[in-house]
Image (cartoon, rainbow, N blue to C red):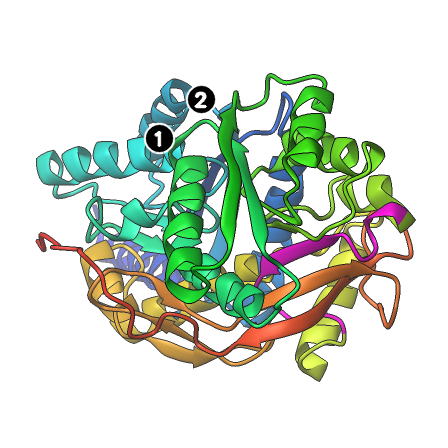
Amino acid sequence: MNKTKTGVLGALTALMLSTSASVADTVKIAFIDPLSGPFAATGENAFHLFQYAVDAVVNDQGGVLDGDTFEIVGLDNKISATETLIHLQTAIDDGVRYIVQGQSSGVAAALIDAINKHNRRNPDQQVLFLNYAAIDPALTNEACSFWHFSFDANSDLKMDALTDVIAENPDLTSAYLINQDYSFGRAVAASATSMLADKRPDITIAGDEVHPIGQVKDFTPYARKIVSSGADFVITGAWGADMYGLGTSLIANGFTGPIYTYYAAASGITAGFGEAGKGSLFILAEGQTNPPASEEAEQYVAGFKEAFPGENFTLARTSNVIRMLAAAINEAGTATDVVAVANALEGLEIENPFGGTLYMRPDNHQVIQDVHVMAHTDDGVTNSLDGSPYGLLVSDSVVAAGRDSATTCEMDRP
């Protein structure tokens, strides 16, 4: 080969290397949750919220690091732990290093266990689990993991806020607890019983029962039992079709007291309840949108509704997940070394456009944020749900709920 050809090839090789070094990478995030079946509406809405978040928070702002972009990939687990673990391995094989999931604490527990084992055996393919909605308190206590971060207040933190509100209302004297029959539902009942006894020992528990998740077609027998018990308020962690079926049956059978819930909003629930839910339904949630907590929050909600016409904006924490992940990646200076990213997430505190601050507790990887008791209403609502005039209006708030609460987490670190 002559010197001229050698020089040209050398220049081309140098150009190619320079170009490849400057090309932005894609940070893949796998969304593993139900996109079919009885809880598809909830899963699809969350997936769309994440799709919007990766663009609005990261990609449209220039990306992370040297222009790396985020991509979220939807994988339908049909709310099955078995399907979830199959998708987890597929995602890992495809180069994904970040997993988001939230529908079902039982599935979340299976993910934590599988990721613990995988990361121990495969130090070159380690992944982080960013949990946006599974709130069994065990997940950040006895089952806590260095590889797991929770971005929703767990059920104990939410119950602490709720029972503070209930304790201030002398008209509430008798509770009925009804929940889905799995780990989260049982955790809701246990914390409600304990905290009510501590804060209002005069309140009686008129009933405490569980029902099969996603299988009850008619909640009338449960509703009639609750009405006949004489309870003047209900606490439930039920979600999806179960929440709608339980709530509508309660109201139809004459229950007039407050129904305190974790998930009685959107995905057809708000429109379905309509006027009947006003004065009856109360939801524990984060993220103030009525009125918006900031101009940024107002623009964010409007942007989502423009991008996904007819969709509900309900989970501000989807933006929180992406916002905190991006901040941690930038601080760590890498998106591929997930240990460095996890270390950057620990103790991270940033402003939340939806109100207050977001702080990731280092000791148990539980995000701390403001928790609100919100009322189903059409009064003063700008962010309405289900195409109806109804939405969620903050009635009571607990700032930085649970920041100093006790934890039994004993975390093994790499």
SS at mark 1? helix
On whether residue 126 falls in the magenta region, the answer is: no
Q: Is residue 190 left or right of residue 363?
A: right
Q: Position of residue 164 (x, y in %)?
A: 50, 69
Q: Residue at x 42, y 29 (%)?
A: 182
Which mark sits nearer the N-terminus, 1 or 2?
2
Q: Which mark is residue 88?
A: 1
Q: Position of residue 404 (x, y in %)?
A: 29, 74
Q: Residue at x 61, y 49 (%)?
A: 261
Span shown in magenta: 276-290
Q: Which residue is mark 2?
A: 80
Q: Position of residue 283 (x, y in %)?
A: 64, 55
Residue type at mark 1: give it: Leu
Front: mark 1 or 2: 2
Q: Is residue 51 left or right of residue 358?
A: right
Residue count near mark 2 (Cα–Cα under 10 Å), binned few <14, some 14–19, many ≥20: some
Residue count near mark 1 (Cα–Cα under 10 Å), binned few <14, some 14–19, many ≥20: many
Q: Is residue 391 left or right of residue 350?
A: right
Q: Position of residue 300 (x, y in %)?
A: 70, 69
Q: Residue at x 48, y 59 (%)?
A: 202
SS at mark 2? loop
Specify the quadrant of the image occupied by residue 396. Answer: bottom right
User: Does residue 14 sit above or below 71 in this rendering?
Assistant: below
User: Does residue 152 sit above or below 222 in this rendering?
Assistant: below
Residue type at mark 2: give it: Ser
